[in-house]
């Protein structure tokens, strides 16, 4: 085996997170310790010359070398969690999902890959993608570049009931929610930011004729906390009484705050720093305030809580909740 083959073999061992011992390598390759030291020195010099974020680190208790990176490398725990989230999202078709999972698994060493693969095998086998089955990765990336470059585009868009429309918009952000990727774009016709499901965008081309001042920029982080089921609208403050699992509310609505606690007799309890996030007492309830965009999305969530919720304000939301519950009741009569 020549020096290039030896160095490549050593490099592969290092990339697989193995500690390489000079004496063991000398025995494996039937060569001298001095030759192995030259191989290791050559690998180290190559890393330095290429200016890549790797370096060889000596491990004294193992009397060997291992590869260390200045960059954070994904470990087996992180790769497992990312794949589990990806599988649960159902956002990608089967081909793009398999390619992405393969790429993530290739970021960890062989032994870690052997541990992670059985933990995702069954869920991957039964994976069912969404009905549109479109390739999304390139489209999401291209639209993201339009956002970075502040380029306006004309899109051909298929609406909910198969109506096709053409819209001139300025992309502002991409948000993922409830299985779908959405393009948040400023629409000058309506002078507001509207949501477009990316899988429904059939075509797009650059127009570069829409400009917004920096002060009017879209705050996607703030928007994400105040939107429910991706139904936009005006910012409103809501108040409701809740008898269910408080944690579910605080997780679902990031802006939610407990402003009052009531016991089983509907008598107010002291509100302390500790119980502002704690569960309500048995048969007790909490009064919660939150800021959200639009009524439609938050109504869907409130109605899903059944008898565990009573909306207190605003009055318009209370009225619409009553109308909706009566409509639901009429379905059963």
Image (cartoon, rainbow, N blue to C red):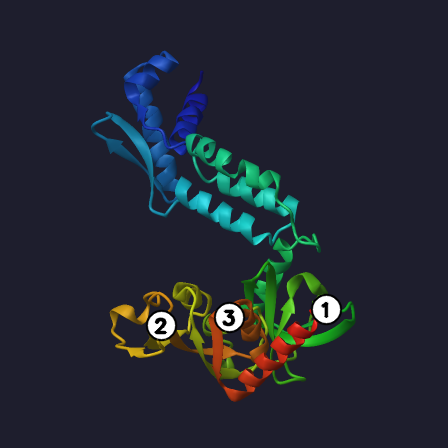
Q: Image height check: is 171 above or below 91?
A: below
Q: In the rendered structure, are the residues bearing label 1 and label 2 in contact, judged by CB atoms less than 8 Å apart?
A: no
Q: Residues within 10 Å of mark 3 (few under 14, many from 20)?
A: few
Q: Is residue 219 at all visible to an observer of this figure?
A: no
Specify whether 146 is left or right of 32: right
Q: Which residue is mark 1?
A: 160
Specify whether 269 is left or right of 47: left
Q: Residue at x 43, y 68 (%)?
A: 249
Residues under labels 3 and 1: Cα distance? 31 Å
Q: Which residue is mark 3?
A: 307
Q: Which residue is mark 2?
A: 264
Q: Residues within 10 Å of mark 2 (few under 14, many from 20)?
A: few
Specify whether 228 is left or right of 128: left
Residues under labels 2 and 3: Cα distance? 15 Å
Q: Residue at x 41, y 33 (%)?
A: 15
Give the camera-side residue of 47 and 13. 13
User: Circle 2 sits in a helix, a strand or a loop, which is it?
Assistant: loop
Quarter containing the N terminus: top left
Among the 4 quarters of the image, the one containing residue 202: bottom right
């Amino acid at each position: 085996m020549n020096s290039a083959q030896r160095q490549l073999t050593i490099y592969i061992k290092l990339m697989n997170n193995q500690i390489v011992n000079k004496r063991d390598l000398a025995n494996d390759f039937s060569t001298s310790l001095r030759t192995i030291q030259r191989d290791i020195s050559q690998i180290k010099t190559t890393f330095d010359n290429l200016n890549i974020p790797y370096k060889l680190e000596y491990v004294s208790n193992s009397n060997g070398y291992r590869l260390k990176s200045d960059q954070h490398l994904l470990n087996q725990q992180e790769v497992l969690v990312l794949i589990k989230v990806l599988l649960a999202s159902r956002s990608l078709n089967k081909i793009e999902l398999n390619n992405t999972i393969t790429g993530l698994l290739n970021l960890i060493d062989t032994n870690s890959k052997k541990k992670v693969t059985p933990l995702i095998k069954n869920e991957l086998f039964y994976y069912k993608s969404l009905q549109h089955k479109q390739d999304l990765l390139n489209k999401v990336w291209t639209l993201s570049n339009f956002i970075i470059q502040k380029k306006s585009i004309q899109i051909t868009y298929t609406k909910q009931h198969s109506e096709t429309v053409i819209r001139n918009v300025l992309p502002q952000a991409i948000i993922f929610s409830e299985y779908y990727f959405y393009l948040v774009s400023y629409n000058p016709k309506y002078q507001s930011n509207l949501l477009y499901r990316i899988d429904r965008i059939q075509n797009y081309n650059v127009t570069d004729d829409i400009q917004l001042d920096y002060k009017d920029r879209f705050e996607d982080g703030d928007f994400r906390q105040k939107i429910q089921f991706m139904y936009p609208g005006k910012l409103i403050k809501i108040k409701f009484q809740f008898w269910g699992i408080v944690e579910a509310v605080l997780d679902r609505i990031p802006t939610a705050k407990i402003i009052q606690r009531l016991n089983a007799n509907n008598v107010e309890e002291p509100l302390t720093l500790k119980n502002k996030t704690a569960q309500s007492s048995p048969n007790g309830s909490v009064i919660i305030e939150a800021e959200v965009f639009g009524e439609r999305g938050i109504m869907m969530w409130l109605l899903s809580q059944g008898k565990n919720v009573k909306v207190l304000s605003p009055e318009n939301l209370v009225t619409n909740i009553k109308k909706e519950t009566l409509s639901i009741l009429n379905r059963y009569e």
